[in-house]
Amino acid sequence: MAVQHVQHMHKALTQMNLQIQHVISDLTGTTGLAIVDAILAGERDPAVLAQRRDPRIQATAETIQRSLVGNWQPEHLFVLRQSRLLYQTYQQQIAGCDQEIEKLLAAFEPRVDPAQKPLPADRKRNRNASKKRKKRGLTATGFDLRTEAYKLFGVDVTQVPGLETSVLPLFSEVGRDLARRWPTAPHFISWLNLCPDNDISGGRVLWKGTRKVQNRAGQIFRMAAYSLHRSPTPLGTYLRRMKAKLGPKAATTAAAHKIAVIFYAIVNKQVEYDETIWAARDAQRQKRLEDKIRRQAKQLGYQLVPMEEIPAA
């Protein structure tokens, strides 16, 4: 719901011919909210408003100043004020939910003590927590999702691409004693409805597809896979390769299947996610591709010869 009030702020600014929401990438960041709060406090001078610019923002002060020349209509200022207050209210309510979740998580016995076994280093690509922008007007709760998930599962599940923010919903759906409910990973995948359920009769495949089952945990894995379309991780590469081969829908299911297998393995065996394993598998796939091309060339009466690197003149 908070995003709707952000859209209302965008519309109010546009109707006043202000273009600040197009100059900065996020109106709810440090610069955007500082300018909006100054406007609501009565400031109308574009030069003074542009001074609220955070030094790290890409847009120059002159560009921001030109984007703040507009018509200050009272009805649109009223909408801007209401939307700003409602956005802040929702953020405070979200912070309250985080506090309540933290209290409820304290009732579960942790599998690991971070003081005795420290949290592993964060190895996620392009997701450095120190580079995240801090939002103004948010209540600080001290709730650390990664640490709490580490205490619950005993391993850092947030290192798996796509599961960075979905670990608590997964915990509420499947728990952490996976082997007790699903003896093997195929049992787990079948329950999630992330595997084919082909209709075979007399050795012939009559129908291909997955069962029509509504499974919330399976949907979480599908959403995790869907978010990897532009990810530079090996799982993102796998998703894009499967899209070219199977199409978007089947590729999302295939990537969700792989993420679920990884999740089951690291939680059940209590091992950390190791992305370097993908390098060996990529090398094996590359070798299979080369062998296939060599066989095809041999069948056609050709012989493949590696290209010699020509030294630069």
Image (spheres, helix red, strand yellow):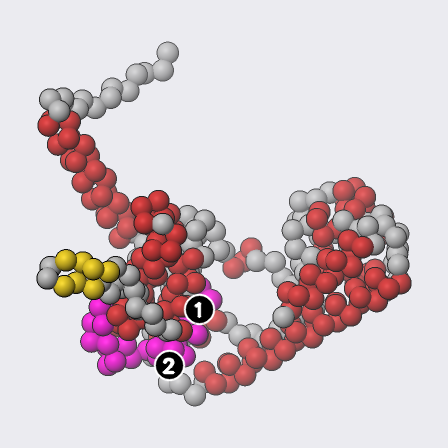
Q: Residues within 10 Å of mark 2 (few under 14, many from 20)?
A: some
Quarter assignment of residue 214: bottom left
Secondary structure type for disc 1: loop
> Is 184 on the left or on the right of 32, as rendered?
left
Residue at the limit of the structure toward the bottom, as seen here? 107
Picture coordinates of residue 175, whole percent (x, y)? 35, 79
Picture coordinates of residue 167, whole percent (x, y)? 42, 71
Q: Is residue 195 magenta?
A: no
Residue range highlighted in magenta: 164-187
> Is 25 on the left or on the right of 295, as rendered?
right
Identified by mark 1, the residue type is Ser
Identified by mark 2, the residue type is Pro
Quarter assignment of residue 302: top left
* Residue beneath the point at 72% across and 72% down: 86
Choose between 117 and 223: the one closer to the eye.
223
- Mark 1 vs 2, N-terminal side: 2
Quick check: 199 above or below 127? below
Residue hosting label 1: 166
Magenta segment main secondary structure: helix
Q: Tell me, yes or no, if residue 110 can be seen here.
A: yes
* Residue beneath the point at 27% across and 68% down: 189
Picture coordinates of residue 33, whole percent (x, y)? 73, 61
Quarter assignment of residue 88: bottom right
CA gap, disc 1 and disc 2: 18 Å
Residue hosting label 2: 110
Q: Is residue 180 magenta?
A: yes
